Image: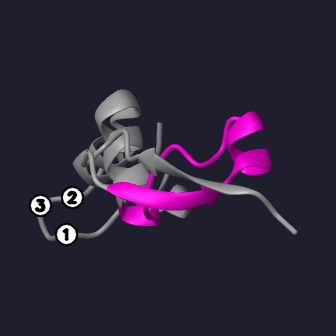
Amino acid sequence: MTSTAQYQCQACGSTFTARSADRARGWARFCSKSCKARKQEARTGQYRTYQERRDDDGCFPSPAEGDVQ
């Protein structure tokens, strides 16, 4: 039988149940994928950078047009 324990989410602070083996691997730090994504965005800013590459009309530059850096 798999041992489980209660942990606290590092993003929102809610408690959730996870396997102890997952916690030992460094997993089970967040209660959901959305909490993980929120924390990762705050750390890396990848999505914000991705959105800033858009043109004024909401489209991304085409590599075929040579506008991509």
Q: Residue at x 82, y 64 (%)?
A: 2
Pick the quarter of the image with the N terminus. bottom right
Q: Residue at x 44, y 60 (%)?
A: 16
Question: Which secondary structure, mark 2?
Answer: loop
How many neighbours does mark 3 have within 10 angstroms: few (below 14), some (14-19), or many (20 or more)? few
What is the x, y in percent for residue 59?
A: 28, 69
What is the x, y in percent for residue 68?
A: 46, 45
Residue pointed to by mark 1: 58
Q: CB atoms at circles 3 and 2 under 8 Å apart?
A: yes
Q: Which mark is residue 55?
A: 2
Q: Residue at x 46, y 63 (%)?
A: 33
Magenta segment:
15-34
Q: Which mark is residue 56?
A: 3
Asked which quadrant contains residue 42, the reply is: top left
Residue sitting at the far top: 43
Question: Which secondary structure, mark 3?
Answer: loop
Question: Which secondary structure, mark 1?
Answer: loop
Q: Nearer the viewer, residue 17 or 64?
A: 17
> Which amino acid type corresponds to the residue marked 2 in the rendered image?
Asp
Decide if residue 13 is on the left or right side of residue 29: left
